[in-house]
Image (cartoon, helix red, strand yellow):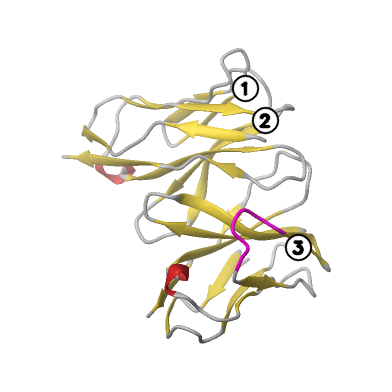
């Protein structure tokens, strides 16, 4: 079945550092890809998404590009802030099937 | 719109007790689902529904029941609570089954079973 693999955490960075969280997927069709973020004590919320190959999703300084050739959707941000500390989930969606999540990556940004 | 709402926020149960976690959405979404989140385990799907009157099992359905009598509500029932069901439970909804819609999550219910 479909699956998502993302890098294990936790990731600890200093403020203004560059962030990359790797995400690769396995899917039989042409899924849509998502990054969700979970701030402490809250539910998940959409950070960005891409629905077809070569699409780039972006939001709040975060970016991810749907790479079909490498089956990847890596999350990047050029300069992280303390307020970006959260858990980040990569996910894929194919048709009417349930959303498939990676295990999540905890990011801590220190001042 | 209130979005996806869940009640209660916190609950403590004794082993063997039953309870219902409530979930409601006011966005007229067809698709709703329940997840549990345990430390280091990410999110695991319990049950989901593609529309009123239709439900299906997810990855970890044992010990949980659901029904979907209306588009808006999707309650999760624990029939006989066990300590292994201590977790944070999230309800989610999305518009339909097109394969590209954003899924919206509730704020979660934190459950402790003693």
Image: A70 above or below B62: above
Q: For the residues marked 3 and 2, what is the alpha-carbon distance in whole angstroms?
A: 22 Å
Q: Secondary structure of the magenta portion, mostly?
A: loop
| Category of crowding for the residue at label 1, using alpha-carbon neighbours closer than 10 angstroms: few (below 14), some (14–19), many (at least 20) | some
Residue B107 in sight in this render: no
- Chain for numbered disc 2: A
Q: Nearer the viewer, residue A85 or B112?
A: B112
Percent x, y for residue A22?
Answer: 43, 26
Q: Nearer the viewer, residue B17 or A87?
A: B17
Instruction: Identify the residue at horizontal 36%, vertical 35% (top origin).
Output: A8
Quadrant occupied by the N terminus of chain B: bottom right
The answer to whether residue A89 is magenta is no
Q: Element type at marker 3?
A: loop
Image: B30 above or below B78: above
Q: For the residues marked 2 and 1, what is the alpha-carbon distance in whole angstroms?
A: 7 Å
Label 2 close to label 1 by CB (< 8 Å): yes
Image: A22 above or below B100: above
Circle 2 residue: A51
Quadrant occupied by the C terminus of chain B: bottom left
Q: Element type at marker 1?
A: loop
Percent x, y for residue B105?
Answer: 56, 58
Circle 3 residue: B28
- Chain for numbered disc 3: B
Q: Are marks 3 and 1 on the same chain?
A: no
Percent x, y for residue A92?
Answer: 62, 37
Q: Find the residue positioned furthest to the right.
A: B53
In the picture, the disc for residue A55 is: 1
Instruction: Identify the residue at horizontal 57%, vertical 70% (top origin).
Output: B5
| Category of crowding for the residue at label 3, using alpha-carbon neighbours closer than 10 angstroms: few (below 14), some (14–19), many (at least 20) | few
Q: Which residues are magenta?
A: B57-62
């Amino acid at each position: 079945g479909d699956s998502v693999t993302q890098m294990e955490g936790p990731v600890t960075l200093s403020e203004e550092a560059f962030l990359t969280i790797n995400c690769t997927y396995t899917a039989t069709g042409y899924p849509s890809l998502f990054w969700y973020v979970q701030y402490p004590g809250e539910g998940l919320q959409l950070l960005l998404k891409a629905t077809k190959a070569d699409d780039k999703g972006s939001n709040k300084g975060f970016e991810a590009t749907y790479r079909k050739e490498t089956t990847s959707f890596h999350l990047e941000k050029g300069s992280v802030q303390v307020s970006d500390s959260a858990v980040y989930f990569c996910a894929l969606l194919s048709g009417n099937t349930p959303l498939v999540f990676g295990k999540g990556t905890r990011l801590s940004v220190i001042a | 719109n209130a979005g996806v709402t869940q009640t209660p926020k916190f609950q403590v149960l004794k082993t063997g007790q039953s309870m219902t976690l409530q979930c409601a959405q006011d966005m007229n979404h067809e698709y709703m689902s329940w997840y549990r989140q345990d430390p280091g385990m990410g999110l695991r799907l319990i049950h989901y529904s593609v529309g009123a009157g239709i439900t299906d099992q997810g990855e970890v359905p044992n010990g949980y029941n659901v029904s979907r009598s209306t588009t808006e509500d999707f309650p999760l029932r624990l029939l006989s609570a066990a300590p292994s069901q201590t977790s944070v439970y999230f309800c989610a909804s999305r518009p339909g089954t097109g394969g590209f819609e954003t899924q919206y999550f509730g704020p979660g219910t934190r459950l402790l079973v003693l």
